[in-house]
Image (cartoon, helix red, strand yellow):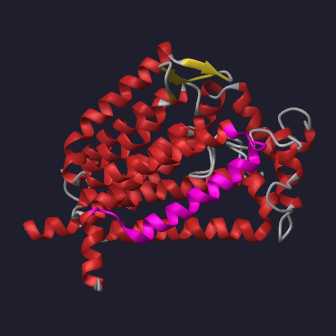
């Protein structure tokens, strides 16, 4: 008979947190069900989704086996590689839907900006761990420069939504290091004062239109406001019980655009209703809470700020996508994490979960060595 202590040892040996993985597994199964409906029962897309999930699980398990000290040691090289990829995609990248965000290798096509979502928090966590906490003003300025460079490279693709998430991934790690609230307030005021400059000199016309249409999507129902209007109809028509799996009219009759990527939450809300939305949000909340608990138990500054920062960014992912499809935030092209169709985003997200489990499960080995 296997005792609780022996079971805990078994999970530690394979560097897996069972509760964390259980929630991830439920989300992935839920994702497959929604993709099958949102794609119009497209077998080819479903095969790709299952392949993405398989690769994602494999990457997560692999990343969980690597000790955190290796991540800290190699973070500068990963950061440099991510910058190199971002520069390459800016010159030779594949253009799709007016944006130059992909590198097409023939066999696979991936977004280098996804790599930056891991590389930026890793390099920031390394810098924080090698300085006193809270970090000095000089170190904070240097870290902000490290965050700004990949953020700018992604923003000019243009991909403002991903650029914001990359900036958040680094800033959250910096915030968790104990940065002074005075510095946070001052930085917020500086960023706010730069909004007019961003609006007039850096944002594209379509990006400005998305913000304008947020206040009144009905002013252009067949143009810029079409996505939001159809999304609201889908969410509202689901009611409490939902219309049933595969029975959503907005998605099945193809009124809802981008229904298997950015607007997949609308498909879920229409078919599974309020109860399905609450179930999904509960899974997200449990995943974030468990991730933050694991972060709090880390025995190094690198582990605490890295794991905590990544879980907060995951929360921002969910918040931005649901706010976007509900008409509360502008449409910025951020997929619903773990649910939307897309290989690069899922694999990088699963890699991040693997890093978090590595930080959590290797802490026992660290304490034994000490």
* 166 left or right, relative to 1: right
Name the image quarter holding the N terminus: bottom left
Which residues lie in the magenta part?
14-43
Residue extending farthest front: 1
Q: Residue 312: x percent and y percent?
A: 47, 58
Quick check: is 16 in the magenta stretch? yes
- Left or right? Give the position of 3 relative to 103: left
167 sits left or right of 42 in the view: left
Residue at x-position 40% and y-position 24%: 85
Residue 224 percent coordinates (x, y)? 83, 34
Residue 291, picture quadrant: bottom left
Placement of the C terminus among the 4 image quadrants: bottom left
Q: 164 or 87: which is nearer to us?
A: 87
For the point 73% across and 40% down, the residue is 42
Q: Is residue 324 visible?
A: no
Left or right relative to 43: residue 213:
right
Who's the residue at 59% across and 58% down the image?
29
Q: Position of residue 15 (x, y in %)?
A: 29, 62
- Viewer-side residue, 2 vs 250: 2
Check the image and name the residue furthest to the top. 92
Query: Residue 160, how many percent across, how many down?
Result: 59, 35
Q: Nearer the viewer, residue 180 or 166?
A: 166
**Position of 212 relative to 290 (above/below):** above
Q: How many marks?
A: 0
> Residue drawn at (43%, 18%), measured in percent from left and top?
88
Dominant SS type (magenta):
helix
The one of 10 and 301 positioned closer to us in this rendering: 10
């Amino acid at each position: 008979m296997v005792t609780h202590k022996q079971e805990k040892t078994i999970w530690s040996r394979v560097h897996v947190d069972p509760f964390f993985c259980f929630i991830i597994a439920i989300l992935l199964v839920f994702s497959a069900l929604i993709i099958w409906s949102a794609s119009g029962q497209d077998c080819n897309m479903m095969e790709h989704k299952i392949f993405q999930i398989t690769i994602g699980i494999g990457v997560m398990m692999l990343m969980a086996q690597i000790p955190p000290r290796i991540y800290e040691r190699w973070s500068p090289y990963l950061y440099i590689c991510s910058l190199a990829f971002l520069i390459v995609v800016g010159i030779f990248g594949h253009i799709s839907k007016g944006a130059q965000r992909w590198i097409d290798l023939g066999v696979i096509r991936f977004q280098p900006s996804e790599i930056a979502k891991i590389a930026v928090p890793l390099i920031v966590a390394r810098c924080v761990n090698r300085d006193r906490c809270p970090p000095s003003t000089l170190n904070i300025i240097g870290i902000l420069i490290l965050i700004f460079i990949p953020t700018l490279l992604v923003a000019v693709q243009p991909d403002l939504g991903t650029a914001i998430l990359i900036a958040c991934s680094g800033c959250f790690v910096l915030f968790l290091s104990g940065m002074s609230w005075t510095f946070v307030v001052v930085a917020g005021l500086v960023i706010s004062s730069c909004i007019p400059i961003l609006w007039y000199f850096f944002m594209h016309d379509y990006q400005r239109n998305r913000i304008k249409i947020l206040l009144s999507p009905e002013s252009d129902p067949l143009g810029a406001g079409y996505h939001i209007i159809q999304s609201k109809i889908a969410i509202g028509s689901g009611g409490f019980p939902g219309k049933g799996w595969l029975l959503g009219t907005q998605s099945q009759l193809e009124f809802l655009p981008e229904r298997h990527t950015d607007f997949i939450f609308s498909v879920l809300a229409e078919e599974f209703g309020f109860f399905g939305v609450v179930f999904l949000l509960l899974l997200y909340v449990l995943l974030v809470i468990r991730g933050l608990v694991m972060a709090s138990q880390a025995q190094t500054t690198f582990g605490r700020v890295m794991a905590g920062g990544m879980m907060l960014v995951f929360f921002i992912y969910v918040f931005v996508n649901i706010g976007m499809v509900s008409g509360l935030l502008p449409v910025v092209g951020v997929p619903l994490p773990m649910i939307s169709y897309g290989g690069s985003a899922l694999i990088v997200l699963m890699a991040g979960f693997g890093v978090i489990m590595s930080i959590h499960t290797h802490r026992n080995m660290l304490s034994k060595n000490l």
